[in-house]
Amino acid sequence: MVTKKTPLYDEHVKLGGKVVDYAGWFLPVQYEGLIAEHNAVRNAAGLFDVSHMGEVVVKGKDALAYLQYLTTNDIGSIETDQIIYTIMCYPDGGVVDDFLVYKYDDEEYLLVVNAANTDKDFKWMIDQKKDFNIILENISDQVGEVAIQGPKSEEILQKLTDTDLSKIKPFHFDRKVNISGVECMVSRTGYTGEDGFEIYSPAEGIVKIWNDILEAGKEHGIKPAGLGCRDTLRFEAGMPLYGHEISKEITPLEGGLKFFVKLDKKEDFIGKEALNKQWDEGLKRKVVGFEMVGRGIPRENYDVYKNGEKIGHVTTGYMSPTLKKNIGVALIKTEETKLDNEIDIMIRNKPVKAVTINKRFYKR
Amino acid sequence: MKVAKGLFYAEDHEWVKVDGEEALVGIADYAQDSLGDIVYVELPEVDDEFDKEEAFAAVESVKAAADIYMPVGGKIIAVNEELLDDPSLLNQDPYESWMVKIEIADKSELDELMTSEDYEKFLDEEV
């Protein structure tokens, strides 16, 4: 597969971004440095190119019924201009992807899916269409998207629009926001644990928006932010990443996302039976947060031991830039997930002590 | 990328500064730059012995962990403990921030390393 460039590729290069191939897209891991960018988002603002995200429109009379069947959360619970996080499962309860659903109206929704999963998701969605009276449209290539994240986000973005952004509440959006002369959709959402907005525009308008936001945010300390800190930020905030805390092999219940799996939803949904069974029988393994007691940084896929027996593996681990602690999330046997439990992380073939803690490491 | 003169370099981007039978070993500018912000360093114990190309230390940035390999075999006679307290020294000045001091086991192994001039060419052509 050919690696694709987002409409902002030239800007990343101009800004000195360290560009890598991520999920089939050329995107910057960092510009100035991961920690500086991470801290900018926590303390001021950071601007991310998220144009690689996939966008799928579901339209038609049965749009709601289809989404209720396709995903685990209760899509019927949101109003127009509201957003809900949901999970799309296989019949065995494994995860196809997790994403946000934007409700345009009763018969039209936008799904914003993980870049790496877009093609797989779209194919899966078509396969599940069956007799539902809907149209599915993959509009990923037409949409540019940036995310401004951090406590100064509203103040900065407000300079570029007449729309009163304070009226857009968390997990809500406005489809007609004029930013830098471009009509955009703006939602109060993000993947960092901070306040912030995600801005969707026609692909050709996104370069102007990107540059104007950086200019408007200069005096507030905004920095362009890369994929590197996107992951450390979401991790500190206890947010899952597909392929790590949830996957084809790890169900949302094991991934600690029961709140988003409405097992008592009146409609049937794909995976409902398997997930109900798993829940009734009791989870054999579950994700939990932990903090290193001994010296060392936990990393994805390091083994986790207890009393010499392997009990699971690390799903994400870092030296947390905000907390300055070596912390991680691990998928381990349920009986070992109680808090304050001493476990060992195998680092370069040596067991290093750690203790289980709540995985929501950072709260703003 | 900066390349300090008068050192030997390995293809894994470690440098060796030879002083008689002893040598300082560290990582090159290229290595610190590709890792990014270095936040953790693991060093061996004094008296540990390592063969050429054996992992003797680890350097980690927020994003990644990298093993550091011996450019030449030898015995550890000192470790730079300052790095344990401030791993970012490796980013700031990789050629001053030596990691270990070794007693070289077999000086003929130095012949297999690159000179500064060779390493500059290597960076241009191979990397």
Image (cartoon, coloured by chain):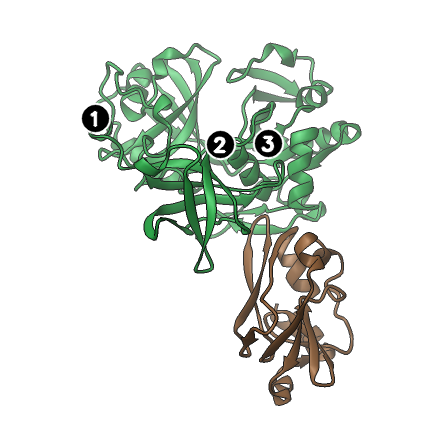
Chain colours: A green, B brown
From the image, state whether disc 1 or disc 3 is nearer to you.
1
Q: Mark 3 points at which residue?
A: A146
Tell me the SS state at disc 2: loop
Q: Which residue is drawn at 55% across and 79% down?
A: B52
Q: Position of residue A338 (x, y in %)?
A: 38, 33
Quarter containing the C terminus of chain A: top right
Asked whether residue A123 appears in the rendered view, the answer is no
Tell me the SS state at disc 1: helix
Chain letter of mark 2 equals: A
Q: Mark 1 points at which residue?
A: A280
Distance, label 2 to label 3, CA atoms, is: 22 Å
From the image, state whether disc 2 or disc 3 is nearer to you.
2
Among the two numbered marks 1 and 3 on one chain, the one whose residue lies closer to the N terminus: 3
Q: Which residue is drawn at 68% across and 38% down?
A: A224
Q: How crowded is mark 1: few (under 14 residues within 10 Å), some or many (20 or more)?
A: few
Residue placed most toward the observer, B79 or A151: B79
Q: Same chain for labels 2 and 3? Say yes or no.
A: yes
Q: Residues within 10 Å of mark 2 (few under 14, many from 20)?
A: many
Amino acid type at image mark 2: Gly
Amino acid type at image mark 3: Val
Where on the picture, by quarter, is residue B26? Answer: bottom right
Q: Where is residue A251 in the image (x, y as percent from the top left)?
A: 31, 35
